[in-house]
Image (cartoon, grey):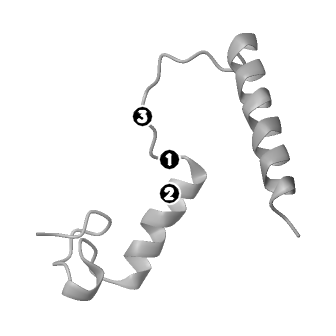
Amino acid sequence: MSCPICQKPTMPAFRPFCSQHCADVDLGRWFKGDYRVPSLRQDNDPEELEELEAEAARLAEETSRHRP
């Protein structure tokens, strides 16, 4: 198996990568959004935003009730 970043042989400690550097490069790509899965969801759909806001408010209220 070869490293998906640089194509060198993988090292067991970093599998599927060859080094910590390549693992970090891959993680950075995830953080930047380079790896994405296509979605049919419409961004900023008003109904979905309302549902998400209601859920966030419910979770915030629930969390505040459990704090000493």
As helix, strand or loop, the secondary structure at mark 3 comes to loop
Picture residue at 75% right of the left edge, 44% below the top: 59
Picture residue at 19% right of the left edge, 78% below the top: 10
Q: Amino acid at mark 1?
A: Asp
Picture residue at 85% right of the left edge, 65% below the top: 67
**Mark 1–mark 2 CB contact (< 8 Å):** yes
Q: CA distance from mark 1 to mark 3?
A: 10 Å
Quarter of the image that includes the N terminus? bottom left
> Splitting the image into 4 quarters, where does residue 5 fall?
bottom left
Q: For mark 1, what is the residue?
A: 34
Residue 17 percent coordinates (x, y): 28, 74
Which of discs 1 and 3 lies nearer the camera? The answer is 3
As helix, strand or loop, the secondary structure at mark 2 comes to helix
Residue 49 percent coordinates (x, y): 74, 22
Q: Decide: few, some or many residues near mark 2? Use Cα within 10 Å; few <14, some 14-19, many ≥20.
A: few
Q: Decide: few, some or many residues near mark 3? Use Cα within 10 Å; few <14, some 14-19, many ≥20.
A: few
Q: Amino acid at mark 3?
A: Val
- The answer to whether residue 21 is above or below residue 7 is below
Q: For mark 3, what is the residue?
A: 37
Q: CA distance from mark 2 to mark 3?
A: 14 Å
Picture residue at 46% right of the left edge, 69% below the top: 25
Q: Amino acid at mark 2?
A: Arg
- The answer to whether residue 33 is above or below residue 23 is above
Q: Looking at the picture, tell me which residue is in the foreground, 34 or 48.
A: 48
Judge left or right: residue 18 versus residue 38: left
